[in-house]
Amino acid sequence: MIIDQQTLDKLTHKNHEQNIQDLQNVERGLETFFKSKNKFPEFDLITHLFKSNQDENWVIAQCQSIEHQLKRLIHDNAYTLEPEKISRELITDISIFNQHHKVFSWDVGIHAQNYLTSMEAFLNAKFSYANYVPASTSGRTFKVISTPAQIRFAIEFKIKNMLRILDHTYSDGSSSIIQISELLNFCEKNSHLFTFPISITALKELNKWSNNFIHSGVFSYYWQSLQAIEIIEPMFSIKDSKSIHLEGFNYLAPGIESPALKEELEKHFNHKKKKTMTFHICDTPLEGRTFAA
């Protein structure tokens, strides 16, 4: 039996029009699901969507996020760059999710590996300089499955560069790495220093979620990655009320400069510590301009 290309594209979910029809069926299934379930407000959604405990609230949060991302894809035209690839990724993950949790009736059944192998990670590192794309052991695009790691890097580099930290040393001459979780705690406890466009609590939840992928290699659902990008995107805006800057902005409160950052960092990290830590802070922003509201 010979299968024509159009039929093959439908079977492999490379046909965007067919994908949209399948996803519209998902929308109808979710509409029925939410007739008996309450949706979460934004903060609670973030808490349940990115946690590791897969309880009933976690399932509801996934469904709410799926519904939101389908609206953005199908009705809001939010994804204009190769939307067929997003529709395919969503179909794959929704199928896997629904097989486990039986949220709605859907005749699309896809079985796929849900973790990143060491060999795939190694080969993508080895050939990162070339256009050559190593064969995927999971059947998924490496850039897609590693999105949580890229999100974590973006958060960590943004916070460290905003704090202008060059390095730090202890009084005995030793040094160590300050975890991004510790810096987020610092930002949360010293909120007067910043004018963040999103909550630090949300950043902490996303940091924990992305770390789960980095340490376990287990894939996140693609709608989680899309939602995470949507949440942090205000931190990476290149336009404020007065200017455009291609490196974006840092969100220090008005009047906060390097000496104040150094003082508060050392006060926070030296509290009840046997060894004194000295921070070396850049006099000017490491990237971007100070945001003007």
Image (spheres, rainbow, N blue to C red):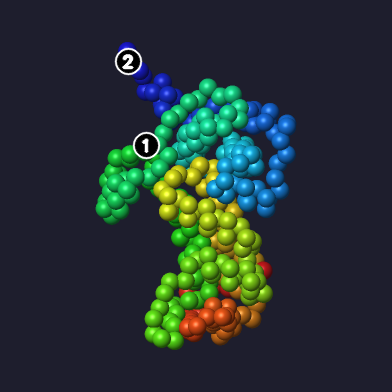
Q: Is residue 283 or residue 278 the one in the foreground?
A: 278
| Residue corresponding to mark 1 | 139
Q: Residue at x 47, y 83 (%)?
A: 275
Q: Residue at x 40, y 42 (%)?
A: 115
Q: Earlier in the sequence, mark 2 or mark 1?
A: 2
Circle 2 packing at 10 Å, graded few (<14), some (14-19), many (20+), is few
* Helix, strand or loop for disc 2: loop
Q: Position of residue 268 (x, y in %)?
A: 58, 78
Circle 1 packing at 10 Å, graded few (<14), some (14-19), many (20+), is few
* Dot 2 and dot 1 residues touching (CB under 8 Å): no
Evaluate whether residue 280 shows in this view. Answer: no
Q: Which mark is residue 2?
A: 2
Q: Is residue 178 or residue 191 the one in the foreground?
A: 178
Residue lying farthest to the top in this orientation: 1
* Helix, strand or loop for disc 1: loop
Evaluate whether residue 33 shows in this view. Answer: yes
Q: Residue at x 53, y 69 (%)?
A: 182
Task: Specify whether 238 is left or right of 4.
Answer: right
Q: Is residue 31 or residue 214 the one in the foreground?
A: 214
Q: Residue at x 32, y 46 (%)?
A: 120
What amino acid is found at the position of numbered circle 2 in the picture?
Ile
Q: Position of residue 129 (x, y in %)?
A: 28, 54
Question: Quick one: quadrant of the N terminus?
Answer: top left
| 192 up-or-down from 221: above or below | below
What amino acid is found at the position of numbered circle 1 in the picture?
Gly
Question: Quick one: quadrant of the C terminus?
Answer: bottom right
Q: Position of residue 192 (x, y in %)?
A: 67, 74
Q: Position of residue 114 (x, y in %)?
A: 43, 39
Alpha-carbon distance for marks 2 and 1? Answer: 23 Å
